[in-house]
Image: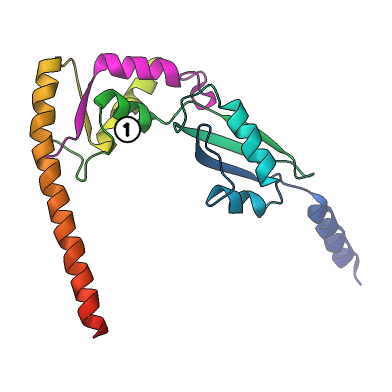
Amino acid sequence: MSKGSRQVKGFRKIVQKVIHPPYIRTHIPAGKAMAGPPLGPHLGQRNINVAMFCKEFNEKTKDIKEGIPLPCMIKIKPDRTFELSFSNPPISYFVKQAAGIEKGSMSPGPKDWAGKISLKHVYEIAKIKSQDPIFDCVPLKEICQKIIDEARTVGVETVRCVTEEEYAAFREERQVIVDQQTAELDEKRKAKIIKQAKAQL
């Protein structure tokens, strides 16, 4: 065996000994970590004690309103223990809460806004998100712009201000559109089922 081959073989052994701690980024509802999918299988593949993880997560999030989605980082150590950290709910969650909606728009944009938020809402959300490690040292103005961009993505328009009366009127008009879209989806779903049934005959 040549000297070069021996060196390569030696490097391979060194590389094999290097352990790169895997990690999992996911969203878990506060107080509702469960061993079932999708979380359980992901942890199980890495030999993490799923029951222990769920117990620790639920204990750490017991003071947060149950069900709120929390962005989590699960760092897995070489000995298969883990470090759990989580941040504030995602921007989209706060935007929908501020707009009073559960779902965004099917076609985000001026022709189909699902809701509206004011600049005051944006500022308040930015102050909360500025506490997240990902926004450490990021100017508040940039965080505000990211919130406005995210709001647009889910179909929520950012306006300077909006009164309760104006927004109530908007929501009524919006509900008519939502009902129409729901009816159209139901029709498409029924048509698909009928088509599949005919194909099986």
Residue drawn at x 56%, y 44% as measured from the top left: 34
Q: Is residue 162 magenta?
A: no
Residue drawn at x 52%, y 41% as measured from the top left: 26
Give the residue pinned by disc 1.
Answer: 150
Which amino acid type is shown beneath numbered disc 1? Glu
Q: Quadrant of the N terminus?
A: bottom right
Residue drawn at x 17%, y 57% as measured from the top left: 186
Relative vertical location of residue 125 with respect to residue 40 in this rendering, above or below: above
Local SS, label 1:
helix
Total marks shown come to 1
Residue 56 shows in this picture:
yes
Relative vertical location of residue 183 with respect to residue 104 in this rendering, above or below: below
Q: Position of residue 123 (x, y in %)?
A: 33, 15
Q: Position of residue 5 (x, y in %)?
A: 85, 67
Residue 139 shows in this picture:
no
Relative vertical location of residue 133 with respect to residue 23 in this rendering, above or below: above
How packed is label 1: few (under 14 Cα within 10 Å), some, or many (20 or more)?
Answer: some
Q: Nearer the viewer, residue 201 or 143?
A: 201
Q: Nearer the viewer, residue 176 or 137?
A: 176
Range of magenta residues: 111-139
Q: Nearer the viewer, residue 73 or 166?
A: 166
Q: Nearer the viewer, residue 17 or 30?
A: 30
Q: Quadrant of the C terminus?
A: bottom left
Q: Is residue 128 magenta?
A: yes
Q: Position of residue 170 (x, y in %)?
A: 10, 27
Indicate the quadrant where residue 73 lies: top right
Relative vertical location of residue 82 with respect to residue 127 in this rendering, above or below: below
Residue drawn at x 10%, y 47% as measured from the top left: 180
Q: How is the image coloured?
A: rainbow
